[in-house]
Image (cartoon, grey):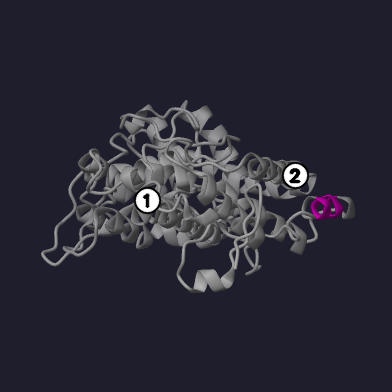
Amino acid sequence: MHISGGDGLFAVNFALYRAGKVWYNGGMNKNAFANVAATEDNPAWKDLCARPAELYARADEIRSPFARDYTRILHSTAFRRLKHKTQVFYNVDNDHVCTRLEHVAHVESVANTIAKYLGLNDELTRAISFGHDLGHAPFGHYGEKVLSALSQKHTGTTFWHERNGLRLVDKLELLEDNNKNLRNLNLTYAVRDGIISHCGEVDQNGIRPREQLIDLEQFDRVGKYQPATWEGCVVKISDKIAYIGRDIEDALSLGFLTRGQVEELEAMAQESGALNTTVIIHDLISDICANSTPQKGICLSDKANKKLNAVKSFNYKNIYSNPRFEPYQAYASLVLNGLFGVLMDMFAPGYAVANVLNGQKYYPLLCSSFSGWLARLCPPEYLPQGQLKELSARCVNAKVYENLDDERVFAQAIIDFLSGMTDKFAVKVHGELLSYRGAIF
């Protein structure tokens, strides 16, 4: 029996694995990170587990702080909506095209496998993985560009999904407590940090956590700081591993690539025999587990890293920048700009909420949904008596839209509302704009 493979590509002998013996490069790196994991033995444990506000307690609670974060994310409506958000290919009616939810599941699988092998905290890794893409807009990265342009014009800030993910879990997403009140998620510092620092677009090898637990508001651009934990570093590299192969599979199944591009892929695949998501994920997980140490960081061998970046470059050139996306991008821009414009036209100091409520006569689903969004996140004095006021009373949370008479605040509320939509819902409510139900004001 033997374990074969060189330069970072490993094949595990099944009999050895089934016998429960050590695997991956002789097991030299198994549990190599146990002494630096985010566990109770870590000197920063209390700070990593700190929350913006304490959660309600249960006498029979058996979960760790990070396991509790995982289930809070899992139970959130923002997580559920990922199943109808575009990953790369907009095709809401094709069950076999990767959605944002499937991508998150892939990241969790990759990251959890690596974390367990290296001796890191797999509960923290799982929570970061499940939360890392909560801030994505509808229509994938192009929807993010549209919202960023709107945000820059109307609020003076840039929209980027990592930052929006932190904003969402800190201020926007609410979860019912054991008294039926709606409260902020109040996730731990380590999970919140992993969400805002997860960007895997930069080609780097040997990821190491930063040394200080900074105020996360200091993140003012994508990738400014590394994650604070080794677990966050694992999720960061797992994000890239998870998407490059899966995006190729979708491109092939949809006939998106030319014959010449397919031949280029086949040439790249000669060494490993196939270039699909299962082969890529297996090879890169094995390579990371064999090469990573606390001294070198979470890293790939030079050969595996070169191969990963080559596949990523292929994807950017032939998939993500493909002109066949232009009609979809134009449609996404039409939908998001149209919805923003209709809602923004309802702004008037002292009358914004009243105008939104009046708009239900003409855009019933859009305006009723937006008024419910405002009720959760604005002070109750802006709301009329009735269901919205009752809803607001149940929301024991930060009121992020303190002054709806401020045009920038109202614009931010619309951008937050749009960013949380699924592709399907955005298309559905945009359809109301074509109904011509009569004059509004």
Q: Nearer the viewer, residue 379 or 151?
A: 151
Q: Residue at x 74, y 60 (%)?
A: 274
Q: Earlier in the sequence, mark 2 or mark 1?
A: 1
| Residue 117 on the magenta segment | no
Q: Dot 1 lies on which element? A: loop
Q: Amino acid at mark 1?
A: Leu
Q: Position of residue 436 (x, y in %)?
A: 59, 55
Q: In this figure, which residue is indicated by the disc labeled 1?
A: 120
Q: Position of residue 267 (x, y in %)?
A: 83, 51
User: Where is 281 relative to 53, above or below?
Assistant: below
Q: Amino acid at mark 2?
A: Phe
List the residue tagged with mark 2.
Answer: 314
Residue 87 seen from this side = no
The range drawn in magenta is: 261-267
The residue at the point 34 percent across, 52 percent down is: 121
Name which residue lies at 55% across and 73% down. 15
Label 2 neighbour load within 10 Å: few <14, some 14-19, many 20+: some
Residue 152: image location, x then y, percent: 52, 28
Label 2: element kind: helix
- Which x, y percent locates residue 395? 23, 52
Name above or below for residue 407 compared with residue 182: above
In front of the other: 413 or 22: 22
Using the rendered view, name the quadrant where residue 403 is placed.
top left
